[in-house]
């Protein structure tokens, strides 16, 4: 499924993998985010942090009308305030979707799948 944007020149289709890469990159840029997590760890058999090429496993995109809802699954670094990290992720994802793709995110839901403790 792709997001369709109608312009006066025609229709632009943006694939969910493109949206997932933008969302994943936006989420991992934030302080306190260790990386992306799989949205279904049992099915994907992934218990580690996702690499850039697998961001689509940690992002779920739902489209309704001209707006989308995005679910982002992240892993947070121990010692950070989860509510602040989540709010920063929401703001960054909304901004980057609008500025890079011209897509308005109706909702950005952040699901924290885990907390990683640093080993010194």
Image: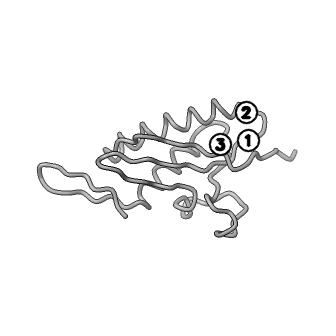
**Residue 4 appears in which quarter of the rendering?**
bottom left
Q: Residue furthest left?
A: 8
Q: Are marks 2 and 1 in contact (CB under 8 Å)?
A: yes
Circle 1 crowding by C-alpha within 10 Å: few under 14, some 14–19, many from 20? some
**In the rendered image of this protein, does residue 49 appear above or below residue 32?**
below
- Residue 37: x and y in percent read 64, 55
> Which residue is located at x 63 percent, y 29 percent?
84
Q: Is residue 120 left or right of residue 73?
A: right
C-alpha distance separating marks 1 and 3? 6 Å
The total number of labels drawn is 3
Q: Secondary structure at mark 3?
A: strand
Q: Which of marks 3 and 1 precedes in the sequence?
A: 3
> Which residue is located at x 35 percent, y 50 percent?
64
Q: Is residue 17 left or right of residue 102?
A: right
- Residue 30: x and y in percent read 59, 38
Q: Which mark is residue 33?
A: 3
Q: Are marks 1 and 3 in contact (CB under 8 Å)?
A: yes
Q: Secondary structure at mark 1?
A: strand
Q: Which of marks 3 and 2 precedes in the sequence?
A: 3
Residue at image mark 1: 77
**In the rendered image of this protein, does residue 26 appear above or below residue 46?**
above
Q: Which mark is residue 80?
A: 2
């Amino acid at each position: 499924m792709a997001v369709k944007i109608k312009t006066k020149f025609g229709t632009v289709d943006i694939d969910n993998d493109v949206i997932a890469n933008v969302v994943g990159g936006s989420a991992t840029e934030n302080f306190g985010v260790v990386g992306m997590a799989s949205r279904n760890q049992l099915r994907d058999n992934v218990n580690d942090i996702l690499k850039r090429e697998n961001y689509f496993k940690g992002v779920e995109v739902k489209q309704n009308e001209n707006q989308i809802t995005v679910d982002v699954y992240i892993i947070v670094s121990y010692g950070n305030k989860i509510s602040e990290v989540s709010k920063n992720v929401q703001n960054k994802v909304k901004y980057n979707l609008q500025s890079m793709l011209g897509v308005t995110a109706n909702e950005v839901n952040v699901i924290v799948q885990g907390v990683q403790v640093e080993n010194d």
